Image: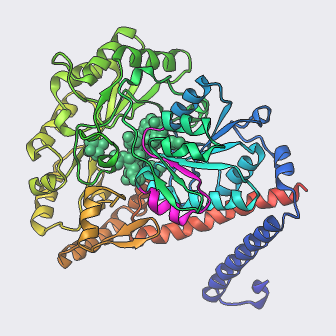
C-alpha cells in the first residue's frame, strides 16, 4: 500500500520491514487467541493433517510416552536418536509396557506440534528427556502448553540436565510430578509400578517427587548399574528418521568416565564414593550391536557416544581397542566417529581403530597453554595435545578440534601461547578462535564462579565477564575481524551446536532467524486454518 505513496527508497524499505513485522506479530497473536479459545478442535484436525513422519495413529493408545524436548531456540537439527529414551523404551517394553517414543528434536517438531501429539496420545505416564541445559526453556513451555490443553496425568523428567538441576526445575515448573536422576531404567520402571501409590515413592532410589503439600522430596541416589550387559539393547524406533536425514546411528559401549574435567556436569552423576565409576559393556556384544545396525538397519555411519571410550584397560588392552578388534572380526566396514581425549591417542590403538572403520574424531584438546589445561583438570599436557594431532594426521583420520579459547580467568600470556600454536595446526576452523567456556549447571567451575559471585543468571543459563578487561578488548577485536573475514561462519557454528552463549553478532542473526521461525510457524498455522 505504501508504494502508492511514492516514498523514496530509503524511507519505503524501513516502512516495508515495520509493516511486515506488525503483520507477523498480529497473525501469531491472532492464532494464539484462537488456539487458546479452543474454538477449533485442533487434535481432530491434526489427526487428519498428520501423520508427520514417524507418527503412527494405530499406536495412539500407550501406557508410557517418551518425548525428547523440541528446540525453541535456533540450532541445527540433531540428526541422531536419543539413546537414553531408546534404553528406557526397551527396558519398559521387556516389562510389558506399551511404550511410544516421540523424538521432537530429531523430527524437528516445534512445541505446538509436540503439544498436539502428546494430547492425541493421552498417555498414562509422560516421560520427558532433558539432557541439555539449552532446551530447559522449551521443556517448560511444552509442559505448560500440555497442561493448558488438559493433560492431567503423571509427568516425569529425566536426563542429565534434569538430574543436576532438579531443584530449580521443580520450583519453576509446577507441571512436573517427578524427576528421575541419572540412570533411569530401574528408577522409572519402579515408579511406573507404583504410579498411583505415592506412599511407595519414598522407597524409590533416584527419585525426586512432591509430597502431599507439594514440597519436593529428594530420595537418596540409586547405585549405578554394575553390569551393563543385562540392560536390553536400545529400541531403535526412530533410527530410520535419523538415517534419512543423513545422521549417525549412536552406540554407547560404556557408561561413566575416568576423567575429572572441571567444566563437566558428569562429575555429579553418581552416588557411589568412587565418582562416576566407569563400566564397560562386553566388546563382543557391542560389535554385535554395530553389526546389526550395519547389516539389518542399513546404518553405515556409526558414532560412539561414550564419555570415555578408552575406559579402564583389561589385560593391558584399552576398552576401545577391544571393541575395535571385535568389530574388525565382523568384516562389516562401517564409518565410525569417536569423541576422544588427547591423553588416549596412541599410535598403537589408533592403527587398530582405523582398521575397524574410525575415520573421524572429535578431539578435545581444549587449549595449548598448560595453566589452562591444569585449570580444567584435563590430565593432559600441551605436548600430548600436539602429539595426538600428529598421530591422527599420520593415520589420515580427520579430527575436529574442540577448543576453549576464552574463560573468565584467561590471561594475555595464555592467549598468546594458544594463538602461537593454533596458527600452525591442521584441522582448525578459524572462527573457533572465539569459543568460550560454557558454564553448565552443577559443574565444578560453575560452582566456583557462583561462589566468587561472577555469574549473571539469565533463565537456566549464566554469563560471565572476563576478569582481565584487556581480554574483552581482544575478544571484541577478533570478533570484528571474523565478521569481516568469515561473515556468518561463527554464528552458523554456534547454531550447529546450540551454544548457550551468543555474542552480539550471534544475537543479530538469531533475531533474523527467529523471524524465519515465526514465518514457518505462521505457514503451519495458515495451513491448519486454511484446511478447516
Ligand atoms: C550423544 C551426545 C550428543 C549428540 C546428540 C545427542 C542425542 N541425539 O541424544 C550431539 C553430538 C548432537 C551432541 C551435541 C552437543 N552436546 Co552432547 N552429549 C552427548 C552424550 C555424549 C551422550 C548422550 C547419550 O546418548 N547418553 C547415553 C544415554 C544412555 O544416557 P542418557 O541420555 O543420559 O539417558 C539416561 C538417563 O539420563 C536417563 N534419562 C534420560 N532421559 C530420560 C527421560 C526420562 C523420562 C527418564 C525417567 C529418564 C531419562 O535414563 C537414561 C538411561 O539410563 C552426552 C554425555 C552423556 N554421557 O550423557 C553429551 C552431553 C549431553 N552433551 C553436552 C553438550 C554440552 C553438547 C553441546 C551443547 C556441545 C557444544 N557446546 O557444542 C552440543 C549441543 C547439541 C545440540 N545442538 O542439540 C553436555 C550437556 C551439558 C548440559 N548441561 O547441557 C553432555 C552431558 C556432555 C558433557 N559431559 O558435558 N551431544
Ligand atoms: S572426559 Fe568428558 S565426560 Fe569425562 S570428565 Fe571430561 S568432559 Fe566429562
Quadrant for the N terminus, please.
bottom right
Is residue 161 shown above or below 123? below
Residue 496 visible to an observer of this rendering: no
Q: Where is residue 237 in the image (x, y as percent from the top left)?
A: 61, 30
Quadrant for the C terminus, please.
bottom right
**Furthest residue in direction right, as rendered:** 532
Residue 486 lies left or right of residue 412; in this view the side is: right
Colour approach in the figure: rainbow
**Furthest residue in direction front, as rendered:** 199
| Near-viewer residue (235 or 483) | 235
Is residue 291 shown above or below 90? above
Q: Based on the displayed image, in which of its 4 quarters is residue 63 positioned?
A: top right
Q: Does the magenta stretch include residue 173?
A: yes
Q: Does the magenta stretch include residue 338?
A: no
Query: Image point 79% across, 87% down: which residue?
Result: 4
| Near-viewer residue (189 or 81) | 189
Q: Position of residue 438 (x, y in %)?
A: 33, 60
**Which segment is the magenta one?**
165-184
Is residue 77 shown above or below 443? above
Is residue 341 shown above or below 285? below
Residue 444 visible to an observer of this rendering: yes
Q: Position of residue 382 (x, y in %)?
A: 10, 47
Residue 316 lies left or right of residue 20; in this view the side is: left
Query: Ligand 2 is found in which quarter of the picture?
Result: top left
Query: Image point 28% across, 62% down: which residue?
Result: 447
Amino acid at each position: 500500500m505504501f508504494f502508492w505513496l511514492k516514498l523514496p527508497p530509503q524511507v519505503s524499505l524501513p516502512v516495508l520491514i515495520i509493516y511486515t513485522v506488525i503483520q507477523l506479530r498480529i497473525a501469531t497473536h491472532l492464532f494464539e487467541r484462537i488456539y487458546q479459545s479452543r474454538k477449533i478442535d485442533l487434535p481432530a484436525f491434526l489427526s487428519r493433517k498428520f501423520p508427520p513422519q514417524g507418527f503412527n495413529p494405530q499406536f495412539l493408545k500407550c501406557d508410557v510416552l517418551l518425548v525428547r524436548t523440541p528446540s525453541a531456540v535456533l540450532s541445527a537439527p540433531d540428526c541422531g536418536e536419543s539413546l537414553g529414551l531408546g534404553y528406557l523404551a526397551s527396558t519398559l517394553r521387556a516389562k510389558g509396557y506399551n511404550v511410544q517414543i516421540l523424538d521432537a528434536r530429531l523430527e524437528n517438531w516445534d512445541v505446538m506440534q509436540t503439544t498436539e501429539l502428546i494430547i492425541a496420545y493421552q498417555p498414562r505416564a509422560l516421560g520427558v528427556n532433558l539432557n541439555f541445559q539449552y532446551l530447559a526453556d522449551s521443556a517448560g513451555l511444552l509442559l505448560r502448553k500440555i497442561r493448558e490443553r488438559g493433560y492431567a496425568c503423571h509427568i516425569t523428567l529425566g536426563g542429565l540436565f534434569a538430574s543436576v538441576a532438579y531443584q530449580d526445575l521443580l520450583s519453576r515448573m509446577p507441571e512436573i510430578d517427578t524427576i528421575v536422576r541419572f540412570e533411569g531404567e530401574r528408577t522409572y520402571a519402579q515408579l511406573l509400578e507404583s504410579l498411583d501409590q505415592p506412599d511407595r515413592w519414598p522407597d524409590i532410589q533416584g527419585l525426586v517427587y512432591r509430597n502431599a503439600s507439594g514440597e519436593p522430596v529428594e530420595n537418596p541416589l540409586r547405585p549405578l548399574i554394575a553390569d551393563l550387559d543385562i540392560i536390553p539393547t536400545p529400541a531403535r524406533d526412530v533410527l530410520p528418521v535419523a538415517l534419512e536425514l543423513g545422521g549417525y546411528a549412536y552406540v554407547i559401549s560404556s557408561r561413566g568416565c575416568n576423567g575429572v574435567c572441571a567444566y563437566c556436569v558428569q562429575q555429579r552423576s553418581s552416588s557411589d564414593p568412587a565418582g562416576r565409576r566407569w563400566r564397560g559393556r562386553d566388546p563382543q556384544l557391542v560389535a554385535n550391536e554395530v553389526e546389526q545396525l550395519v547389516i539389518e538397519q542399513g546404518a553405515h555411519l556409526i558414532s560412539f557416544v561414550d564419555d570415555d571410550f578408552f575406559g579402564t584397560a583389561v589385560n593391558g588392552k584399552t576398552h576401545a581397542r577391544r571393541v575395535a578388534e571385535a568389530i574388525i572380526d565382523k568384516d562389516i566396514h562401517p564409518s565410525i566417529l569417536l569423541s576422544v581425549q588427547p591423553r588416549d591417542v596412541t599410535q598403537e590403538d589408533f592403527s587398530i581403530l582405523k582398521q575397524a572403520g574410525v575415520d573421524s574424531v572429535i578431539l578435545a584438546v581444549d587449549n595449548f597453554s598448560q595453566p589452562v589445561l591444569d585449570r580444567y583438570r584435563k590430565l593432559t599436557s600441551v605436548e600430548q595435545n600436539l602429539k595426538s594431532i600428529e598421530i591422527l594426521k599420520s593415520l589420515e583420520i580427520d579430527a575436529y578440534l574442540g577448543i576453549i579459547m576464552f574463560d573468565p580467568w584467561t590471561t594475555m600470556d595464555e592467549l598468546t601461547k594458544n594463538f602461537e600454536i593454533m596458527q600452525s595446526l591442521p584441522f582448525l576452523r578459524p572462527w573457533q578462535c572465539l569459543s568460550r567456556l560454557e558454564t553448565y549447571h552443577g559443574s565444578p567451575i560453575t560452582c566456583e564462579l557462583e561462589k566468587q559471585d561472577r555469574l549473571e543468571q539469565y533463565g537456566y543459563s549464566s554469563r560471565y565477564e572476563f576478569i582481565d578487561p584487556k581480554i574483552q578488548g581482544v575478544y571484541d577485536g577478533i570478533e570484528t575481524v571474523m565478521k569481516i573475514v568469515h561473515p556468518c561462519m561463527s554464528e552458523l557454528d554456534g547454531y550447529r551446536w546450540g551454544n548457550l552463549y551468543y555474542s552480539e553478532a550471534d544475537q543479530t542473526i538469531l533475531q533474523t532467524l527467529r523471524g524465519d521461525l515465526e514465518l514457518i510457524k505462521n505457514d503451519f498455522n495458515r495451513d491448519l486454518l486454511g484446511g478447516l
